[in-house]
Image (spheres, rainbow, N blue to C red):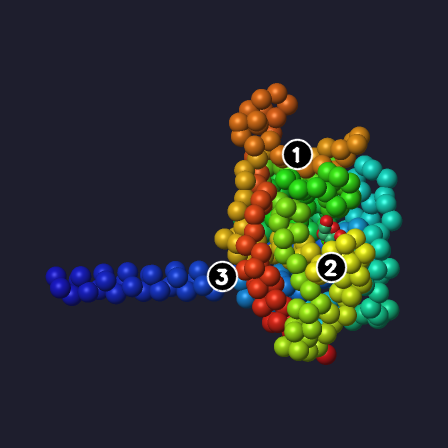
Amino acid sequence: MRGNTLNAFSALLLFILLTSSHAILAKEKIIIDADVGIDDAMAILFATASPELELLGITTVFGNASIENSTKNALYLMQRTGLNIPVAQGAHTPLAIPPEPPTDFVHGGNGLGDIPVPDTLNAAPHELSAAEFIIQQSKLYPGEITLVPVGRMTNIALALKLDPTLPSRIKQVVIMGGAFEHPGNVTPVAEANIIGDPHAADVVFQADWDVVAIGLDVTTKVIVSDKDLQKLEKDNPVPGGFIRDFSQFYLAFYRSVGVEEGFYVHDPAALMYVVAPELFSTREAAIRVASEGIAIGQTIAALPPQNTRGAWKDVKLNRYADTVDSKAAKKLFLSHMRKVRFVD
Ligand code: BDR
Ligand code: CA
């Protein structure tokens, strides 16, 4: 009898040990969809240095840079890190509105703050398009992938069009985009990733999956200065120096618009949410995107019970972040950037 109790106890202990070590070892599978400019590059490097994340691939989109430069920048980052992570190229224009030129005044002519990027790289883009790659990975890892779009959401909308069953295989979607209780950064109401393709953003919010929007309400609360980057360079010389170099253009842009303290850590904030959601508070709301007129690109959030009336009645609920622990988020950002490794 006593032997049986002991055996049952040991089995229980073994079960707890196995399940908890699995929980410790299991990494969150992610795909980053980015218009690889400066803060996108930081988000990608953050992911490569995150013990909590497994970066399955990077899909690229137009926006901060042309689609060619966006893809080239992603491939170059992979070359520097020596990681064999696929880069799949995506859309070069929005779904329905006329294309705008890249935002080179923020990210430089090549998207990476005009630091030199070699003409020839040692890897080519994946044979699948961004949308096809997302669908392929979702079939390989059903229910396990967090999609992290940090640019215009055109590729995600195209993937939904190609395969409307995609949401059933995606764990969650964490976007950098939107301005909810905060002014926009392109118009008084619109944030860049949303106004860059408002139709795509609306499709993403309406699809049958859980979306968490990390918008300007929180990303403008996490600010990194050149002094922080100097320290990063000292602690992690080669990657830190590279990050500091490509950030100079970005710092100059922020200074030109009156932000003297540094730059906003937009895109990495979406990754920070995936890694440490406890640093954020979120609100549940029905979210739609205005796709024409003076409010084009506005992310409108109907907080319950507003979502129970009129045109909002059947709009599904998602979440947007409304507060962030700025100090802890900045600490997390810098500590992960200290872990970025390059092979040359
Ligand atoms: C967003 O716009 C782009 O410039 C940044 O990369 C970020 O994704 C911020 O509004
Ligand atoms: Ca971006």
> What residue sits right under mark 1 in the picture?
300
**Foreground tag (2 vs 3):** 2
* Furthest residue in direction left, as rendered: 1
Tell me: 279 left or right of 207: left
Q: Residue at x 84, y 65 (%)?
A: 114
Q: Report if the CB atoms under discs 1 and 2 are less than 8 Å apart.
A: no
The span from disc 2 to disc 3 (Cα, nearest Å) is 40 Å
In the image, what residue type sits under mark 1?
Answer: Ile
The quadrant of the picture occupied by the C terminus is bottom right
* Furthest residue in direction top, as rendered: 310
> What residue sits right under mark 3 in the picture?
26
Relative image position of residue 219 (x, y in whole percent): 65, 52
Q: Is residue 205 above or below residue 70?
A: above
Relative image position of residue 130 (x, y in whole percent): 73, 52
Tell me: 4 left or right of 156: left
Q: Residue at x 54, y 50 (%)?
A: 280
For marks 2 and 3 on the same chain, the one whose residue lies earlier in the sequence: 3
Question: How many C-alpha atoms fall within 10 Å of the one at disc 3: few (<14), some, or many (≥20)?
Answer: few
For marks 1 and 3 on the same chain, the one whose residue lies earlier in the sequence: 3
**Residue 298 visible in the picture:** yes
For marks 1 and 2 on the same chain, the one whose residue lies earlier in the sequence: 2
Task: Compare residues 259 and 98 and report the one nearer the observer.
Answer: 259
Question: How many C-alpha atoms fall within 10 Å of the one at disc 2: few (<14), some, or many (≥20)?
Answer: few
Q: Residue at x 18, y 61 (%)?
A: 5
> What residue sits right under mark 2 in the picture?
260
Relative image position of residue 332 (x, y in whole percent): 57, 63
Dot 1: what SS? strand
Tell me: 18 left or right of 182: left
